[in-house]
Image (cartoon, helix red, strand yellow):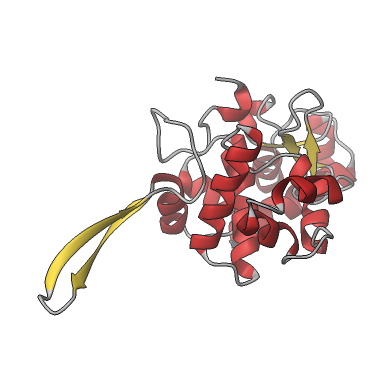
């Protein structure tokens, strides 16, 4: 199991990073059961729904890997635009059949345009709708999300996420600081910077001196952590 696919994020932390409820994150990662009344008999029946994202077997099913995190980020965006969970599940199954991987967080789905549609148009209708609304142009919001992600060259999978954009100084890299958000190039987690900031009575100059950071870097960490705390 590579570092990108190692479960390292608990559902509470995932919910803060992508601004969704912890309960929903758990259901999307683990699947869930619900009870309903069947027909005229009014017999109560339990039904199990599989996880929303297509995950490999995991010893820690309620924890997310980095790739799970990116998958969940995109699922949230699709739901916000009115696609049903049923449609998203089907699209992820089609994606797995197409590329042989169980993650949707791959470069080809966000940057390959017409080439990918030539492959999916005949037998992956749900995937096509997910990517483009049924058209031959990748939806603008997918392009914008892709700009926050750095893809690994050999595999094409997402390798880093820049939640404030690539000019925003904050990166989530599973190879650095156990996947916690850090300042680009400094390997100092944003939560540590924020703790120093509070401990120094919100004196940014002292934080810069103690941690050898610029004011822009400290401000980026404060902005990011403040956003997480408000989620």
Q: Please name whichever residue, 166 or 81, is drawn nearer the observer in this view of the structure.
A: 81
* Residue 40 appearing in the image: yes
Q: Is residue 147 above or below residue 174?
A: below
* x then y, percent, for residue 105: 67, 42
Residue drawn at point x = 50 percent, y = 62 percent: 85
Residue drawn at point x = 58 percent, y = 39 percent: 96
The N terminus sits in image quarter: top right
The residue most toward the top is 1
The residue most toward the bottom is 40
Q: Please name whichever residue, 223 or 7, is drawn nearer the observer in this view of the structure.
A: 7
* x then y, percent, for residue 116: 78, 46
Q: Is residue 47 above or below residue 66?
A: below
Residue drawn at point x = 82 percent, y = 56 percent: 144
Residue drawn at point x = 74 percent, y = 45 percent: 119
* Residue 203 appearing in the image: no
* The quarter of the displayed image where residue 87 is located: bottom right
Left or right: where 144 falls relative to 192: right
* x then y, percent, for residue 138: 81, 58
> Could you tell me how many numbered marks the image carries?
0
* x then y, percent, for residue 9: 52, 38
The C terminus sits in image quarter: bottom right
Q: Please name whichever residue, 126 or 181, is drawn nearer the observer in this view of the structure.
A: 126
* The quarter of the displayed image where residue 79 is located: bottom right
Q: Please name whichever residue, 187 or 58, is drawn nearer the observer in this view of the structure.
A: 58
Left or right: where 162 falls relative to 81: right
């Amino acid at each position: 199991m590579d570092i990108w696919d190692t479960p390292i994020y608990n559902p509470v932390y995932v919910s803060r990073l992508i601004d969704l409820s912890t309960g929903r994150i758990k259901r999307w990662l683990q699947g869930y059961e619900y009870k309903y009344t069947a027909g005229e008999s009014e017999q109560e029946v339990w039904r199990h729904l599989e996880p929303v994202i297509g995950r490999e077997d995991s010893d820690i099913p309620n924890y997310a890997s980095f790739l799970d995190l990116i998958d969940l980020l995109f699922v949230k965006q699709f739901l916000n635009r009115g696609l049903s969970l049923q449609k998203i599940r089907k699209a992820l199954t089609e994606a797995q059949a197409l590329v042989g991987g169980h993650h949707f967080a791959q470069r080809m789905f966000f940057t390959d345009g017409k080439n990918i549609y030539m492959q999916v148009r005949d037998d992956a209708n749900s995937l096509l709708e997910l990517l483009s609304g049924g058209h031959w142009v990748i939806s603008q919001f997918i392009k914008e999300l892709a700009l926050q992600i750095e893809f690994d060259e050999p595999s094409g999978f997402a390798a880093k996420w820049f939640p404030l954009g690539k000019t925003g100084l904050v990166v989530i890299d599973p190879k650095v600081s156990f996947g916690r958000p850090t300042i680009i190039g400094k390997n100092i987690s944003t939560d540590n910077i924020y703790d120093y900031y509070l401990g120094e009575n919100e004196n940014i100059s002292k934080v810069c001196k103690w941690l050898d950071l610029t004011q822009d870097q400290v401000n980026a960490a404060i902005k990011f952590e403040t956003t997480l705390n408000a989620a």
